[in-house]
């Protein structure tokens, strides 16, 4: 399916043809199975070679100014009887009336569908509407995915295990020594009192 930019480029080129008074402007939507890379042919003719050159100049200037796009190649501009401008997604053919009748591109492309500028405008609007409809759906999907991916809560067992950490043997020994040191003065006092009592009893 052609991109939105492809529609816009073809419409801008067709408008340039109209501004330069080109005759019998036709847009051919090409069959993808036969056309290779291009989606459209834009075909028209001027009344003389000089007008044909002016038409192609206007197309090139407009697409460069509005889109920053240049043709990959331009052929036949010097002679002016049949000028071809290749924009990859579409190709412009500007003929003299005689050369157009002689080569008959419309007849050669039997599988192509002829579109008016109004038809192409309608396709462009449909493509824009479709693109806008897809954008909210994508953003909603991203939001849902972010909400679904949350860090899992840590198990209660692990938290409890961290809270109750058994003391190492070294720490236990140190704790006992500390208690013993605190109890030592009291023990000494009790021993002194007991000795004093024994002495008093002997007397």
Image: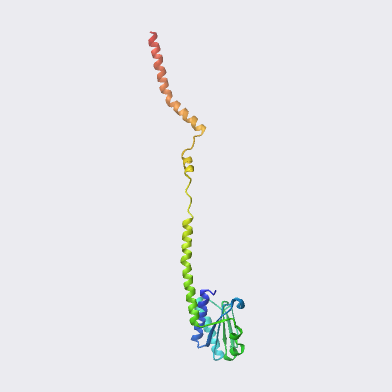
Could you tell whether 203 is left or right of 139 in the image? left
Query: Where does the N terminus fall, quadrant-wise?
Result: bottom right
**What is the count of numbered marks?**
0
Tell which of 92 and 30 is nearer to you. Answer: 30
Name above or below for residue 70 compared with residue 197.
Answer: below
Name above or below for residue 203 compared with residue 139.
Answer: above
Question: Residue lying farthest front?
Answer: 111
Query: Where does the C terminus fall, quadrant-wise?
Result: top left
Name above or below for residue 156 compared with residue 76.
Answer: above
Q: Position of residue 191 (x, y in %)?
A: 42, 18
Name above or below for residue 199 compared with residue 103.
Answer: above
Res 50 visible: yes
Determine the residue positioned at 52% across, 32% down. Answer: 169
Tell which of 79 and 30 is nearer to you. Answer: 30
Structure colour scheme: rainbow
Q: Position of residue 12 (x, y in %)?
A: 50, 80
Determine the residue positioned at 47% across, 69% down. Answer: 133
Q: Position of residue 148 (x, y in %)?
A: 48, 56
Question: Residue lying farthest top?
Answer: 203
Res 77 visible: no
Q: Position of residue 68 (x, y in %)?
A: 52, 76
């Amino acid at each position: 399916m052609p991109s939105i930019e492809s529609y816009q480029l073809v419409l801008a080129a067709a408008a340039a043809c109209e501004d330069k008074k080109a005759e019998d402007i036709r847009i051919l939507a090409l069959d993808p199975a036969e056309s290779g890379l291009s989606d459209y042919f834009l075909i028209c003719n001027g009344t003389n070679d000089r007008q044909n050159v002016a038409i192609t100049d206007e197309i090139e200037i407009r697409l460069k100014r509005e889109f920053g796009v240049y043709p990959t190649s331009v052929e036949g501009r010097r002679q002016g009887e049949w000028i071809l401008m290749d924009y990859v997604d579409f190709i412009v053919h500007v003929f003299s009336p005689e050369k157009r009748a002689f080569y008959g591109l419309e007849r050669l492309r039997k599988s192509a569908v002829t579109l008016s500028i109004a038809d192409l405008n309608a396709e462009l609007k449909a493509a824009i509407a479709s693109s806008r409809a897809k954008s909210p759906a994508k953003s909603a999907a991203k939001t849902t995915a972010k909400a679904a991916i949350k860090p899992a809560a840590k198990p209660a067992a692990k938290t409890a295990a961290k809270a109750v950490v058994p003391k190492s043997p070294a720490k236990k020994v140190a704790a006992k020594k500390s208690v013993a040191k605190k109890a030592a003065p009291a023990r000494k006092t009790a021993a002194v009192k007991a000795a004093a009592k024994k002495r008093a009893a002997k007397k």
